[in-house]
Amino acid sequence: ASTNDLKNGLVLKLDGGQLWSVVEFQHVKPGKGPAFVRTKLKNVLSGKVVDKTFNAGVKVETATIDKRDMQFSYMDGEYFVFMDMDTYDQLMVDRKSVGDAANFLIEGFTATVAQHEGEVLFVELPAAVELVIQETEPGVQGDRSTGGTKPATLETGHQIQVPLF
């Protein structure tokens, strides 16, 4: 693909095979000199965001990211086992690839698993998930030193802050 074809969400292979997602791009045509494309790129694995400028029309290598909805089945040691609901194939994903989503996963949840050339890049949960709160302290009315929140433990064991009511 050419830098003229860049769009948000496109994944590029740069810097020796690292995957970068286009977050922002802007075609700039100055009064003097050649046109160029100013981009903001996010590293798919680390989440690091960098600014990079390309000359207009330069060829860049794009990468295909395969995103599929899969159901979380169970934990197998340090691995999360997901099942493809169409083919019933099982996929073992390590904790690093699951990331923070591990704190909100329970059996039966559907998550989006992103892969590139058979390697799992990350696991994405829906914007909202419903979990049961196992334990929380009674909120003290009028206690605003905590900003109107109190700690609560989810059924996954993860602690979050919830409103006082």
Image (cartoon, rainbow, N blue to C red):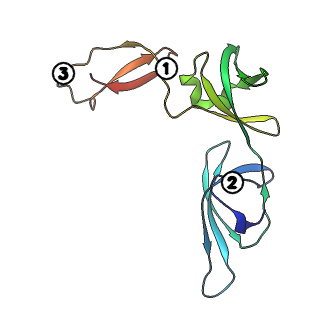
Q: Amino acid at mark 2?
A: Leu
Q: Which residue is mark 1?
A: 158
Secondary structure beneath label 1: loop
Other residues around mark 1 within 10 Å, as few (<14) / some (14–19) / many (≥20): few
Foreground of the two, 64 or 100: 64
Q: Earlier in the sequence, mark 1 or mark 3?
A: 3
User: Which quadrant of the view contains residue 117?
Assistant: top right
Quarter of the picture containing the C terminus is top left
Q: How far across and down, in percent of the image, does residue 82 sit? A: 70, 22
Do the residues under discs 1 and 3 have CB atoms within 8 angstroms?
A: no
Other residues around mark 3 within 10 Å, as few (<14) / some (14–19) / many (≥20): few
Gap between marks 2 and 3, in whole Å? 49 Å
User: Which quadrant of the view contains residue 73?
Assistant: top right
Quarter of the picture containing the N terminus is bottom right
Counting the numbered discs, the total is: 3
Q: Earlier in the sequence, mark 1 or mark 2?
A: 2
Rendered view: 52 above or below 125: below
Secondary structure beneath label 3: loop
Task: Residue 10: give its label.
Answer: 2
Q: How far across and down, in percent of the image, does residue 29 sit? A: 62, 80
Q: How far across and down, in percent of the image, does residue 6 sit? A: 68, 62
Name the side, left or right, on which 110 lies relative to 156: right
Q: Which numbered mark, 1 or 2, is in the foreground of this view?
A: 2
Task: Residue 141: give its label.
Answer: 3
